[in-house]
Amino acid sequence: MTTPTVAPTTDTTPSTHAQPVDGALPLPVLRNVADLRAQVAAWRAAGQTVALVPTMGALHDGHLALVRRGRELADHVIASVFVNPTQFAPHEDFDRYPRDEAGDAAKLASAGCAALYAPSVRGMYPEGFATAISVGGPSEGLCGTFRPQMFGGVALVVTKLFLQALPDVAVFGEKDYQQLMVIRRFTRDLDIPVRVEGLPTVREADGLALSSRNAYLSVDERARAPELNRALIAAAAALSAGALLEDVLTAARARIAEAGFGTIDYVELRDADTLAPITRVERPARLLAAAWLGKARLIDNVPVLPA
Amino acid sequence: MTTPTVAPTTDTTPSTHAQPVDGALPLPVLRNVADLRAQVAAWRAAGQTVALVPTMGALHDGHLALVRRGRELADHVIASVFVNPTQFAPHEDFDRYPRDEAGDAAKLASAGCAALYAPSVRGMYPEGFATAISVGGPSEGLCGTFRPQMFGGVALVVTKLFLQALPDVAVFGEKDYQQLMVIRRFTRDLDIPVRVEGLPTVREADGLALSSRNAYLSVDERARAPELNRALIAAAAALSAGALLEDVLTAARARIAEAGFGTIDYVELRDADTLAPITRVERPARLLAAAWLGKARLIDNVPVLPA
């Protein structure tokens, strides 16, 4: 059991309106569960629906695409910004993870987001907190091997956010494909009454998947980074054309290494729904990779369709 | 992670009306989540509130007291009957745990229960189920030591029942005091929007706590069984009067052993709210015990007030 070590307190931080930034509309910022529930209850009382877009902030156009999708699916969108300590291991980048609430609020308002929910760490994990969630199945292998703490932390914080807001629908990006499958799994297993929607990865013009961690890349690394995606696309095409998995993966790893990536955590083929390891593409599959480029651990994935 | 091994299926068991038994009113029996949610939604649409009483069946007057308390707290009471495999270890009494749905339905109807929810094991834990919940804090020690599988299983099934029904309030007996504290803990930690109410233990005239497992007692054992409660009451009185904990526990264990109990799993003093071990009674405390009498493992607990 991993219990976050945080100072004891009860969250009584008042909610506020974010200051307008660069002419963007101001956005209500809710900082505790009571204010969040009051806002959702007011919308529900008016017969309106709610979409939730959970984020860790440092928002980019990929996040804003989730907000726009949420607006298609519901009357109002709430985005949460919470850098969740329970999904980071001690050696990982919790402390240096980029944070910019004013900038995030301006972007969310411009995308039509109705409210920003930004709870405190102490509000989420008060004194005496003692509960953990573990998910097998889709969390096994891939990032689950290299970041063993992550998916339990994700399951815990997403369960809390779901049950705090009780939205009709929540929207997540396929960029974090394994995370999306883990969220679908525990949401179904725990009977959480929230519909989970996935949205295809938003990319730069050169194919690089948008990620808050791209900020860690140097100019030179940024130029090399799209090779991760290109290697996956080429590999997916070869697999659909009937090439042997082992040959395809060897070629993909070589291409990623040649592009200047350091450690390649994994390049793997999985079933698209269960994430079970597979060796042949007989139904929809997914090719997933994680590799280090300088100080950034980049992940990407692409669909692989049967021939 | 403990995942129950059950055959794959999707639960499509139709819900029914229980047959009238001995002239009792019939009771709607809901057998899947869709029917449960439809019933709750119908009541909500009429502005009415709902209490849930989770049970494992084999109902006795203690359970019916929970139903009656539920009726005081909400417009309608749903009782669930589900013998949950994930909270039993392989050597425990899952298979022989008493089951009597017709009898349970008649009792519930007579107590004013509005519906019985009786999901199947396969409906609760379908193929691919992969999620577990663990709770530290109040689940540590006591029954958590002797039945290490239990509280994770309880947390999982109660979370599912809460999120399936989303009642306004749920009622549990103080007979299972540690379980009640564990349920309060994860309900709060996961932000489950359900109020958890505890009700004092219902006892036979001679003090024996009502329990479905009392059915395992022989006539002779049944006559000896109330000594567990008497030993706890005497110990609580001694502690409130300032006696030393060690002396009190030694005397209590001796009295329980003299009554013919076999293995005494524990007799312990704990803080009444956190269940943290304590040695002196400076604020409300709880004295808890578990001991074997023949084939029955009996548990009991009593409040201990500061002098």
Image: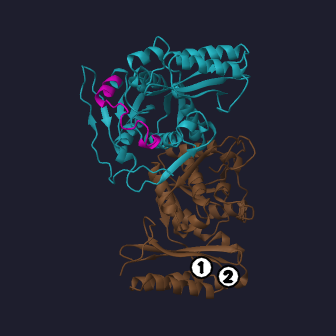
Chain colours: A brown, B cyan
- Tell me how far mark 2 sits from mark 1, CA to CA: 9 Å
Q: Is residue A142 above or below residue B168?
A: below
Residues at discs 2 and 1 in contact (Cβ within 8 Å) = yes
- Out of A263 and A239, give the one closest to the viewer: A263
Q: Which residue is mark 1?
A: A208
- Region in magenta: B85-107
Q: Nearer the viewer, residue B10 or A38?
A: B10
- Queried whether the magenta region covers residue B270, the answer comes back as no
| Amino acid beneath label 2 | Arg
Mark 1: amino acid: Leu
Query: How many numbered marks are there?
Result: 2
Q: Position of residue A241 (x, y in %)?
A: 39, 86
Helix, strand or loop at label 2? It is: helix
Chain where mark 2 sits: A
How crowded pointer 2 is (Cα within 10 Å; few <14, some 14-19, many 20+) is rated as some
Q: Looking at the image, which is closer to me, B271 or A177?
A: B271
Which residue is pictured at 62% across the width and 13% down the height? B234
A290 w.r.t. B285: above or below: below
In the rendered image, which quarter is residue B248 located in? top right
Which residue is tagged 2?
A222
Confirm whether residue A234 shows in the render: yes
Q: Residue at x 71, y 28 (%)?
A: B278
Q: Is residue A71 visible?
A: no
Tell me where residue A88 sits by quadrant.
bottom right
Chain letter behind tag 1: A
Residue, x 28% and y 39% (percent of image)? B15
Looking at the image, tell me whether mark 2 or mark 1 is earlier in sequence order: 1
The quarter of the rendered structure image containing the C terminus of chain B is top right
